[in-house]
Image (spheres, grey):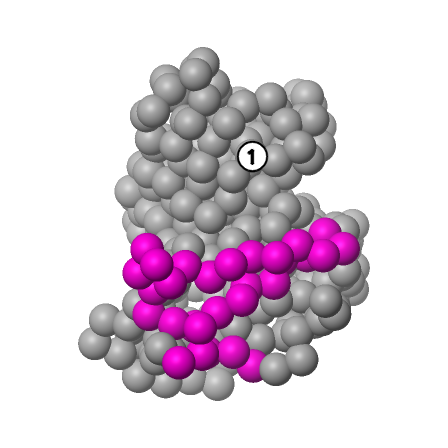
Amino acid sequence: MGAISMTWSLPTLTSSKLPRVNRYSGMAFATVNKDTATLGVKVTEGLGKLPKVVLTSSHGSEAELYLYGGCVTSWKVGSRDLLFVRPDAVFNGQKPISGGIPHCFPQFGPGPMQQHGFARNSDWSIVDSENVDGTPVITLELKDSSYSRAMWDYSFQALYKITLDKKTLSTELKITNTDKKPFSFTTALHTYFSASVSGASVKGLKGCKTLNKDPDPKNPIEGKEERDVVTYPGFVDCVYLGASNELYLDNGLGDIISIKNTNWPDAVLWNPHLTMEACYKDFVCVENAQIGNVDLEPEKSWVATQQLSVG
């Protein structure tokens, strides 16, 4: 089977109408029933011929996500994209997509396995979709495979539910231990926002314990955030422990974005500055994170939500 050659409308899914996912050359292709379409949800061919899902709300907002990495790459309210994909991003099904909202799971940052784990360069599949009063909703799934078990030898299920409303993009990540033994993980949503870095700032972090990875990421400097408004004056790579469940990003382009969450206890601010000279001025990262280990017993689940809203 070759690449997708047509745009598909995703069905309203029931247990008997789940899309079948065929894997060829490391990519996932959703085979769907075209007779029962879910309004506002389409599977099409994206960059690099990778399967892409386009969500369109009845209010005119739009989002795009790739099954490779389960990565949301675009969120438009009006004409401007509020997310950012780096110009050096590759869409070849081999490397993680650099930009949008990549997953870090089951490891945030460096560690015993590859940087940020394997979820961001694994094929996710579609398990559900619906349209609620003009609001499209889709749920993706990632399960353990021989690829993941070579790095992390556990059975698990990750469900990622994405909801697009008029001015809001919401996600719910649910990790379930389907193994017979407990496991531990860390995780984050590595969100890239379009921004003018010189004018960008974040509110809501004052009082947090900080782990500043500049200049040495292997030996972060502990501190406390004293500023009401945190900016990006140069290279920034800082973890905020016990962050508020709502932060406010001024992207320097005229937008104030509320970043609200449940059960993401920490936050990370990042901008690579001159180490990424071609594009650092055009984005900032504000990441919801779980820096400490989540210990999950068999048959138990961990759930966290993120809600991005623009005024």
Residue on which the image places disc 1 = 144
Report the quarter where the C terminus lies: bottom left
Q: Position of residue 96 (x, y in %)?
A: 69, 51
Residue 266: name its quadrant. top left
Provide the secondary structure element on which disc 1 rests: loop
264, above or below 43, in the image: above
Please check the rendered image and state whether residue 16 is part of the magenta-colored stretch, yes or no. yes
Query: Which residue is at the front of the view, 167 or 131?
Result: 131
* Residue at (71% x, 32% y) in the render: 114
* Residue at (60% x, 22% y) in the render: 153
Furthest residue in direction front, as rendered: 16
Q: So how many labels did they put on this image?
A: 1
Please check the rendered image and state whether residue 128 is part of the magenta-colored stretch, yes or no. no
* Residue at (45% x, 37% y) in the render: 157
76, above or below 240, in the image: below
Residue type at tag 1: Asp
Q: Is residue 132 left or right of residue 265?
A: left
Q: Is residue 124 visible?
A: yes
Q: Position of residue 176 (x, y in %)?
A: 39, 32
196, above or below 175, in the image: below
Furthest residue in direction left, as rendered: 133
Report the quarter where the N terminus lies: bottom right
Write down the region rendered in magenta.
7-35
Q: Position of residue 105 (x, y in %)?
A: 54, 36
